[in-house]
Amino acid sequence: MSPDAVTVHGMSTSGNCHKVRLLLEQLGRPYQWVEVDSANGATRTPEYLAKNPNGKVPMLERADGRILVESNAILCWLAEGTPFLPADAWQRAQVLSWLFFEQYSHEPYIAVARFIRGWTPPDSPRRADLPRLVERGGQALAVMEKHLQSADWFTGDAYGVADIALFAYTHCAGDGGFELRKLPRITDWLARVRATPGFIPMPAVSDEVAARLATS
Amino acid sequence: MSPDAVTVHGMSTSGNCHKVRLLLEQLGRPYQWVEVDSANGATRTPEYLAKNPNGKVPMLERADGRILVESNAILCWLAEGTPFLPADAWQRAQVLSWLFFEQYSHEPYIAVARFIRGWTPPDSPRRADLPRLVERGGQALAVMEKHLQSADWFTGDAYGVADIALFAYTHCAGDGGFELRKLPRITDWLARVRATPGFIPMPAVSDEVAARLATS
């Protein structure tokens, strides 16, 4: 195994995990993928917690066993020295700003609404959270729509890690109950992301999840 | 005004804002501080939203009007090229990992529990969230305690931005109902942070907030 080899432990239908796969594909960098059923406790085993005490996916493992967790930190590390992450300190700070926005103001509402609607039973008490999540997630999408009034991308002048991070759960925001057709600039940006070289879509959810999303 | 001058718009008793002030003080870098009463709507005015559409503090403004938001992105920008942020790419990725951990797995529980107990009335319906916040925040503190079994700092071999970010709400976790005395390694680390050169404590909360915290 090459010392540069990386293994990604992830759940394919998780946007946070797909971020990492999408960047690796677009970098043309070889990787191994270990599927982890995060929705059913596979990140809570003693073996997994020994590697990542926070018990989350994705997790990147290097050939020598060193570990890196947190999807957006993994993106930055993989993108270092490539066109996916600007070298200029101010531009880079703006990229980080969007990455923190994504994890604090976007994902906890848009991804969690999708999870509740698709991965919890119809009578789950968590469904009571949905109106609040949709309100807050809508605010995050409005911030993105406003940015796209005067910019084509979130990573400075070109496509890069901030676009990958924000694409992850924006493109499937409909699963969480958000109406993307009311957001024309986001809709156009999603199309631009899908047209980038080496783009691969996130795998489809299982039939069971799809059925739940369709009736939520 | 020097082109390097920075203005920080922040609420002094917010941990996210204090992070920025603490680093600026420790860097010995001059700055202006504009107090923003975030708890009472001052980040929701048209003037503020024109600068930061996400309506949050802290916000850094440069002499030429350029804006940077998200506390941890501001820390990274200010720390670039200083001992507070490692130059090595892998170490830097680990720092980012802790910064994303702080914003995703730590702050939304520990800071929010503090806010609800100190800044909302005793009959606020948000108080029903406290048991869940205390459970999740406790998990974050356990991850930190485990890291400190084999390391003195969160920023690699030395004190730096990941320590500053995690200190912000860990040191006042008691305000949120967490018992730090049960976490000896965190307690020792907090003391090490307080002993770093140029350290300044977060300003005390108002008498009204202090009274509410004391009876929560």
Image (cartoon, coloured by chain):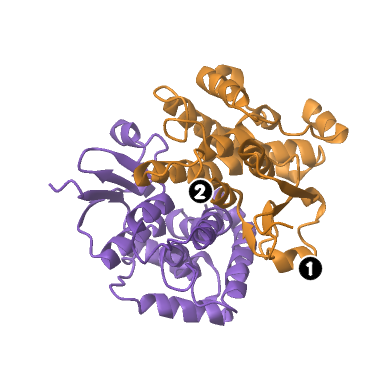
Chain colours: A purple, B orange
In the rendered structure, which amino acid carries the disc numbered 1?
Pro
Please give left or right for residue A160 compared with residue B214 in the image: left
| Residue B207: x %, y % from top left | 87, 32
Q: With respect to residue B205, does B187 lie above or below?
A: above
The outermost residue toward the right is B207
| Residue B200: x %, y % from top left | 69, 31
Q: Nearer the viewer, mark 2 or mark 1?
A: 2
Q: Residue A50's quadrant in the figure? A: top left
Residue A200 in view in this figure: yes
* Number of other residues with Cα within 10 Å of mark 2, as a class: few under 14, some 14 to 19, many 20 or more: some
In the rendered structure, which amino acid carries the disc numbered 2?
Glu
Question: Which chain is disc 1 placed on?
Answer: B
Give the mark count: 2
Tell me, yes or no, whether the two marked residues, 2 and 1, touch with CB atoms within 8 Å. Answer: no
The outermost residue toward the front is B2
Q: Nearer the viewer, residue B26 or B215?
A: B26
Question: Which chain is disc 2 placed on?
Answer: B
Residue B129 circle label: none
* Number of other residues with Cα within 10 Å of mark 1, as a class: few under 14, some 14 to 19, many 20 or more: few
Q: Residue A108's quadrant in the figure? A: bottom right
Sequence-wise first label, 2 or 1: 1
Identify the residue shown where x is 50% and y is 20%.
B185
Identify the residue shown where x is 78% and y is 43%.
B124
The outermost residue toward the left is A1
Mark 2 and mark 1: Cα distance apart in space: 32 Å
Q: Nearer the viewer, residue B183 or B19?
A: B19
Q: Which residue is mark 2?
A: B80
Q: Which residue is mark 1?
A: B46
| Residue B113: x %, y % from top left | 67, 38
Q: Secondary structure at mark 2?
A: loop
